[in-house]
Image: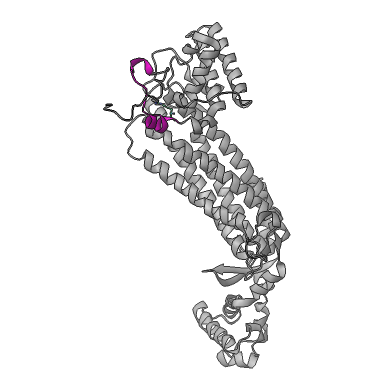
């Protein structure tokens, strides 16, 4: 009878890279929970770049021979080609990308491979790889967010004077222009890009050479590897270097904010494309049909962007919880940083593309927007402002008068402009026909010339300023 049912005859073999003091391999479940290769293989190019930089430094500092260094470096290049042409065999027993590559290097070049890990640990190695990977991801997200801003700016420019209702509480509030509404998102995505750019500064610091946690007794040159890998500097504390994942948490919080902005825009697109609003028609490429209702065209792209925001916010929470209260320095909990990060970068990148596509291809139904802007007494504030400006009334009093005018229009079932002047004068005898001039939505919009306001001339300026700032 076997006392340990988990250690069957199929038990995986001992890992050759660290198995010296072991007599038995891990349990099946242990191998499964331990292996990260299925997801961290995405770090292969960064891992090889980090190893080559480390190797060149070891040679320069005469820690390994030039000959071994050259064998290692060209062996790593060959492995990169194997991975890229699909012939590399990834093994669970070798746990992660670092050991898969090192083991293959030993197969290819023999004993010299064993010298690569001098003055290095997987702890500084994985932190280096992840920082390099995230730096590229940030650059690519920045470029596509910029494209999204460019598309929004183009649509805003075409619609600086297209009137639509502005909402508060999703109730018609005051008329605005579609261009102004779209420019609100250009600002949001501008802040998102600033957050990512700021985060990138803290990502771009090299932990390589921190070793397992304490540094090393070999005469390494951390500034040299940092420079070679394009980092701005080497991190100042080896213990911090191997245990810091703030840079991922920080990126994920920026990603969560960015995708929530996209989800707000997606939600507006869902509303706007409904029959009830009819403000926009989505292009067929970004809609789907129903398997039962032949007439349907559903805004699934927008809904999925809205839905995927949950994953990214969840990724932030999951890594935050994993990192909270971890004692220094490295612990395997930190291997759980990668999947949320990779998934968030993938989700965010895809959502940016989909939102950009929807914005570029949707039709703007200006008539429906204009009609909706007329509804809901959207220029009531303008009438109150007229009373303040022309009659010198305190705003509160003007508000009360216009409230009674709106109630009268509601009772009559007509718009403010259609109320007979005599009836309005019963409420406030000083109201003249000039007051009714301000009720046109185009005039209401044109009058809001304050900085950041919706007047077309201001929106034009805002577009020019945003182009200069963001593109
Ligand atoms: N696969 C590991 C990770 O992603 C690499 C570092 C392993 N370090 C260790 N001491 N076991 O975190």
Q: At 56% from the left edge and 80% from the top edge, which residue is drawn?
A: 392
Q: Is residue 401 above or below residue 209?
A: below
Q: Looking at the image, which residue is at 71% across and 67% down?
A: 366
Q: Residue at x 72, y 70 (%)?
A: 367
So how many labels did they put on this image? 0
Left or right: 333, with 163 as reference point: left
Q: Most extreme residue toward the front, as rendered?
A: 1
Span of residues in magenta: 19-35
Q: Nearer the viewer, residue 270 or 39?
A: 39
Q: Quadrant of residue 441?
A: bottom right
The image quarter containing residue 334 is top left
Q: Tell which residue pokes out farthest to the right in this image.
A: 158
Observer able to see residue 207: no
Residue 86 percent location from the top left of the image: 61, 26
Q: Is residue 125 visible?
A: yes
| Residue 313 or residue 219, whichever sits in front | 313
Residue 354 vs residue 157: left or right?
left
Q: Position of residue 36 (x, y in %)?
A: 46, 31
Residue 376 within the magenta-colored segment of the rendering: no
Answer above or below: position of 355 versus 293. Answer: above
287 relative to 321 in the view: left or right: right
Residue 165 or 338: which is nearer the viewer? 338
């Amino acid at each position: 009878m076997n006392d340990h049912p988990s250690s069957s005859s199929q038990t995986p073999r001992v890992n050759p890279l660290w198995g010296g003091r072991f007599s038995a391999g891990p349990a099946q479940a242990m191998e499964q929970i331990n292996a990260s290769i299925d997801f961290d293989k995405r770090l292969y190019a960064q891992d090889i770049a980090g190893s080559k930089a480390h190797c060149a430094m070891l040679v320069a500092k005469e820690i390994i021979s030039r000959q071994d260094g050259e064998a290692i470096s060209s062996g790593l290049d060959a492995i990169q080609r194997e991975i890229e042409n699909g012939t590399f065999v990834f093994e669970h027993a070798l746990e992660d990308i670092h050991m898969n590559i090192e083991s293959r290097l030993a197969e290819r070049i023999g004993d010299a491979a064993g010298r690569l890990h001098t003055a290095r640990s997987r702890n500084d190695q994985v932190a280096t790889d992840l920082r390099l990977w995230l730096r590229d991801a940030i650059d690519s997200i920045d470029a596509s967010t910029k494209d999204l801003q460019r598309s929004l700016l183009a649509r805003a420019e075409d619609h600086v004077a297209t009137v639509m209702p502005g909402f508060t509480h999703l109730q018609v509030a005051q008329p605005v222009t579609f261009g102004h509404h779209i420019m609100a998102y250009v600002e949001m995505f501008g802040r998102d890009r600033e957050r990512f750019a700021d985060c990138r500064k803290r990502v771009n610091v090299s932990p390589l050479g921190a070793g397992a946690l304490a540094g090393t007794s070999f005469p390494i040159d951390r500034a040299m590897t940092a420079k070679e890998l394009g980092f701005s500097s080497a991190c100042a504390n080896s213990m911090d270097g191997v245990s810091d994942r703030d840079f991922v948490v920080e990126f994920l919080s920026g990603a969560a904010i960015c995708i929530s902005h996209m989800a707000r825009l997606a939600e507006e697109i869902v509303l706007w494309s409904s029959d009830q609003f009819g403000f926009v028609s989505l292009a067929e490429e970004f809609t789907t049909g129903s398997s039962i209702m032949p007439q349907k065209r559903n805004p699934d792209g927008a809904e999925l962007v809205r839905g995927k925001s949950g994953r990214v916010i969840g990724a932030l929470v999951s890594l935050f919880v994993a990192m909270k209260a971890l004692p220094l320095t490295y612990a395997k909990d930190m291997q759980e940083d990668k999947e949320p990060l990779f998934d968030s970068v993938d989700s965010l990148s895809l959502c940016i593309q989909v939102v950009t596509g929807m914005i570029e291809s949707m039709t703007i139904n200006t008539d429906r927007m204009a009609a909706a802007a007329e509804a809901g007494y959207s220029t009531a504030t303008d009438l109150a402002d007229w009373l303040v400006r022309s009659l010198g009334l305190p705003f509160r009093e003007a508000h009360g008068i216009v409230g009674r005018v709106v109630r009268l229009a509601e009772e009559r079932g007509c718009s403010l402009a259609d109320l007979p002047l005599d009836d309005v004068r019963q409420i406030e005898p000083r109201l003249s026909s000039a007051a009714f001039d301000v009720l046109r939505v185009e005039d209401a919009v044109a009058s809001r010339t304050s900085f950041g306001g919706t007047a077309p001339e201001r929106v034009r300026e805002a577009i020019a300023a945003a182009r200069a700032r963001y593109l």
